[in-house]
Amino acid sequence: MNRWQRFDNFISRLEQLMISVLLGVMILAAFLQIVLRNFFSTGLAWGDPLVRYLVIWVGFIGASLAVREGKHITIEIVAHWLPARANRYLRSVSHLFSALVCGLLSWAALKFVRVEALMGGPAIFGLPSWVPQIILPAAFGIMTLRFGAQFGIELFTDSSSGLKRYQNLKT
Amino acid sequence: MTLTLAVIITVVLLLIGAPIFIVICGLTLYLFYSSQIDFSAIIVEIYRLATTPVLVAIPLFTFAGYLLSESGAARRLIRLSNAFLGWLPGGLAVIALCTCAVFTALTGATGLTIIALGGILLPAMMRARYSEPFSLGLVTTSGTLGLLFPPSLPLIVYAVVAKVRIDHLFIAGILPGILLVVLLSAFSVYQSLRTEVPRSRFQLNEVLEALKDAAWELPLPAVVLGGIYSGFFAVSEAAAISAVYVLLVETVIYRDISFRALPGIMRQSMVLVGGILIILGAAMGLTNYLIDEQIPLRMLAFFKAHIHSKIIFLMVLNGFLLAVGCTMGIFSALVVVVPLLGPIAQAYGIDPLHLGIIFLTNLEIGASIPPLGINLFIASMRFEKPVLRLYVASLPFIAILLLALALITYWPSLSLMLIK
């Protein structure tokens, strides 16, 4: 488990770095477009597509971090009325299911990128169109690992609040 | 038979707290599998997000909203409105309502209002001798007040999902939004007259000081709204301008936020954006499958067979949306329910813009409705009060909001008159 935590910490630092850089570039590029359009009646051809790709990247990195921080939108009706022990088992079921779904999504995303690599045209900066799509299998893959690890922690840690404690440690 | 089982499993997983996007994707994968569609089609649907032009407004406005909530903007906003309105009977309550509405519009109804403003407003109201239940109820139900004012995130998400013109939707929300604030303000004034809350005096000095204090933040709503309404720039451009402007004002001019705090704020805000975008993408896959299978058409046939009048349809719609807003939360309700109910409502002759305002008002109120409204839980955590006490405290406010909802629902021109 220790090795997993080190790996997870490394990934999340990388994600933090990417979010800061990509969001910064997104804000600058979007702003630059406005300045060019309104004051110089021109614009960058790659500006709008770049911003759209950045939204997808930042969004999916955020979604992956949201798994780590337990911040995805959920409906927790049952949890309010059940004892801690029962909750733990229910949570582990939900983590296992989430890992399975994300696993399938990663596989589907890989397939999607492979097809695009064979048939797709160019994106921006002379890059082929599958390059910006890489974020999909990558993010779903990391989400699969994180849900899987949370399932393990929930099921095999002694304390009834294993995952909560683990999440507190990280932040 | 197996479909029924799949739906039951889906509901159970939702109830035990599996993330909503996971459950939607799981159900979609099952449906694709059983109709032998390749799994990568779900990714094609999710990736269609990349071709939605207005989408960039979501991360940019969210980031600007998080910056505002981390800065001293809330304090300055309250000081300013206090200087202007503090002399009125019920002034502080009216201030609380107005500031919450403005703040929610800017930060996007994501629970930030109660966290950022509640901590200042609640003690101030208690000091001004408003009763505790009244103050608690007001601050709790105001957590989503202002959701109808641009540039709130739910308005943008509705426009994306329902494919309506976002600038028109922004205009449609104004009068209904004002109606909500005015009705609640009238109730507050009445309450404070009855309980004889002391008032403060109007002081020109304080007004000028407060104006000077907030001078850099005041232009923001004017620039954003003025720019959009005059057609000077598009919504996504307004979002970029807000992000740059707020960033400069809060880090360089007020210095409320240090540069070292920026990566953390970026991360927090993008975690929220990721949570919303991924539900949006997941729901696109599911709803497109359902539309291909003509589910909305079949639902429409069912509705037409049982509900003949528009008024009854609207009543059923309101009840359903309040329940959905209370359980699913605003964003997931929008992306899942709008594509399914939109065509049906249109068949009953409801304008898509008016429908959007009905949707958002319902979801706004649903967020405060016991036992599950999210505002109640956020307020309970923020103010360290038992949820039960908040249930009771919010009831009178919910009654007034429901009255406003009835007006908004059955008086379409309130939403549409400014557009024509």
Image: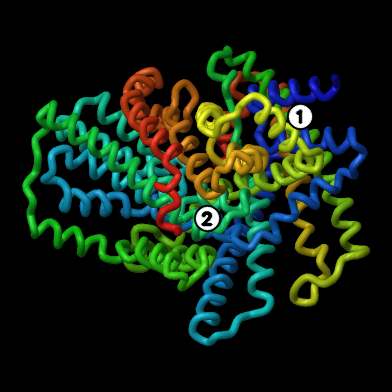
In the picture, the disc for residue A97 is: 1
Q: CA distance from mark 2 to mark 1?
A: 30 Å
The chain to which mark 2 is attached is B
User: In which quarter of the view is residue B303 placed?
Assistant: top right
Confirm whether circles 2 and 1 share one chain.
Answer: no
Type of amino acid at the residue the image marks with label 1: Phe
Q: Is residue A24 visible?
A: yes
Relative to A30, say whether B8 is above or below. above
Q: Characterize the local packing of mark 2: few (<14), some (14-19) or many (20 or more) Cα atoms within 10 angstroms.
A: many
Q: Nearer the viewer, residue A111 or B405?
A: B405
B26 left or right, relative to B168: right
- The local secondary structure at tag 1 comes to helix
Residue at horizontal 56 percent and vertical 36 percent from the top: A169
Name the image quarter holding the C terminus of chain B. bottom left
Q: Characterize the local packing of mark 1: few (<14), some (14-19) or many (20 or more) Cα atoms within 10 angstroms.
A: many
Q: Which residue in the rendered view is the most extreme toward the bottom? A: A40
Relative to B366, say whether B254 is above or below. below
Count of numbered labels shown in the rendering: 2
Residue at horizontal 42 percent and vertical 41 percent from the top: B411
The chain to which mark 1 is attached is A
Relative to B248, say whether B322 is above or below. above
Q: Nearer the viewer, residue B119 or B238?
A: B238
User: In which quarter of the view is residue B302 placed?
Assistant: top right
Relative to A8, say whether B49 is above or below. below
Q: Is residue B66 visible?
A: no
Identify residue for label 2.
B266
Q: Point out the frontmost of discs 2 and 1.
A: 1
